[in-house]
Image (spheres, grey):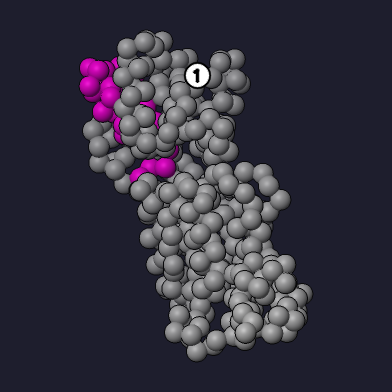
């Protein structure tokens, strides 16, 4: 007795992913007509029989959207996820949320699962590394997809990017620090090779070079631990550094602790400006100056644009940058 053909056999015959075959079987409108025809022919050729009763038990994907975040431990991304989920709910959509934890293999699994469940749209803050295969599956399935706050590194697949005006944010922070603290201004945080690090430090770099100064970098993971350890290092070995612009608020908050441990008074002996302006920035001591990126408004407006694509087939611009501003507090004002 010959083996009953499976969805994997259909995918191989059609030259598409298993996820795309699932979408065709669910009669999803997100699959391109040419791809649908290709899959239907493969179903006919392989004599595959769809078990619709079993599929119905898994539930339909109508009204379901996918949100994949690279690091939900970061309160900035947690706030984004909350804002996005509530806005999707307001528009009548349920949200499947996945945390890739900066792991491209886990990200690929999440993408495959969401495609198989027939999501109407995807919003992704991508993890770095891995290959393009999962994103090619999204593209082949024709699912409206946007990247948020960071973008894929190179590759042949691209989706509209919704992010912040990092360049302006860095310029504002660097200008304030140079004016208030003098020439010895450093940038702390961010893995050096990542595009998001290059973007977030770009304004600082431009301002320093415009002033004829050499940028000073301390690159590393964008978390409190790195900030704490770097503050100890600067206090011990770099008396020439008088001001710091950080990759994000988590690094800055770690530095507050590190400098306190080293007996350096932030706001008096040295200045710090964070990036993102998470809630804790206004609640720590001393209160943290930060480049404010309004993630609430950002999330809600991005949802509206993405759903306009889903419901009205209006594709957004390839890149949209949201405005930022500098919020000054005691960590940098010398008051």
Can the viewer see residue 305 in this picture?
A: no
In front here: 151 or 43? 43
For this orientation, the residue located farthest to the front is: 1
Quarter occupied by the N terminus: bottom right
| Place of residue 47 in the rendered image (x, y in percent of width and height, measured from the top left) | 69, 85
| Place of residue 255 in the rendered image (x, y in percent of width and height, measured from the top left) | 32, 28
| Place of residue 295 in the rendered image (x, y in percent of width and height, measured from the top left) | 44, 52
Which residue is depicted at the point 35% across and 29% down? 227
Based on the picture, tell me whether residue 273 belongs to the magenta stretch: yes
Q: Is residue 112 above or below residue 182?
A: below
In front here: 66 or 34? 34
Give, as a single range, the part of the protein colored magenta.
Answer: 253-278
Can the viewer see residue 233 in this picture?
A: yes
Which residue is depicted at the point 41% across and 65% down? 85
The number of numbered badges drawn on the structure is 1
Q: Is residue 280 above or below residue 315?
A: above
Q: Which residue is mark 1?
A: 216
| Within-10-Å neighbours for mark 1: few <14, some 14–19, many 20+ | some
Which residue is depicted at the point 73% across and 72% down? 14
Based on the picture, tell me whether residue 15 belongs to the magenta stretch: no
| Place of residue 21 in the rendered image (x, y in percent of width and height, measured from the top left) | 63, 74
Q: Is residue 217 above or below residue 31?
A: above
In front here: 335 or 118? 118
Quarter occupied by the C terminus: top left
Label 1: element kind: strand
Which residue is depicted at the point 56% across and 26% down? 205
Task: Say left or right for 7 vs 243.
Answer: right
Q: Is residue 241 above or below residue 8?
A: above
């Amino acid at each position: 007795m010959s083996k009953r053909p499976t969805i994997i056999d259909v995918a191989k015959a059609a030259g598409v992913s298993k996820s795309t075959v699932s979408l065709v079987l669910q009669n999803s409108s997100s699959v391109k007509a040419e791809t649908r025809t290709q899959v239907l022919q493969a179903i006919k050729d392989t004599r595959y029989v769809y078990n619709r009763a079993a599929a119905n038990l898994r539930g339909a994907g109508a009204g379901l959207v996918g949100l994949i975040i690279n690091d939900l431990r970061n309160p900035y991304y947690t706030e984004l996820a909350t804002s996005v989920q509530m806005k999707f709910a307001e528009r009548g959509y349920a949200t499947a949320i996945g945390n890739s934890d900066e792991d491209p293999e886990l990200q690929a699994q999440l993408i495959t699962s969401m495609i198989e469940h027939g999501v109407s749209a995807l919003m992704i803050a991508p993890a770095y590394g891995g290959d393009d295969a999962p994103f090619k599956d999204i593209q082949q399935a024709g699912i409206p997809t946007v990247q948020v706050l960071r973008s894929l590194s190179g590759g042949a697949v691209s989706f509209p990017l919704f992010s912040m005006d990092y360049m302006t944010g860095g310029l504002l922070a660097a200008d304030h620090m140079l004016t208030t603290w003098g020439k010895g201004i450093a940038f702390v945080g961010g893995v050096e090779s990542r595009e998001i690090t290059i973007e977030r430090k770009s304004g600082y770099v431009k301002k320093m070079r415009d002033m004829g100064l050499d940028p000073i970098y301390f690159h590393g993971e964008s978390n409190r631990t790195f900030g704490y350890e770097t503050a100890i290092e600067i206090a011990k070995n770099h008396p020439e550094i008088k001001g710091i612009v950080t990759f994000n608020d988590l690094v800055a908050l770690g530095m507050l602790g590190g400098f306190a441990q080293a007996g350096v008074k932030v706001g008096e002996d040295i200045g710090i400006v964070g990036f993102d302006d998470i809630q804790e920035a206004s609640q720590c001591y001393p209160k943290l100056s930060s480049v404010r990126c309004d993630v609430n408004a950002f999330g809600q407006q991005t949802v509206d644009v993405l759903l306009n694509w889903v419901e009205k087939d209006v594709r957004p611009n390839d890149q949209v940058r949201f405005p930022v501003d500098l919020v000054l507090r005691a960590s940098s004002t010398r008051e």
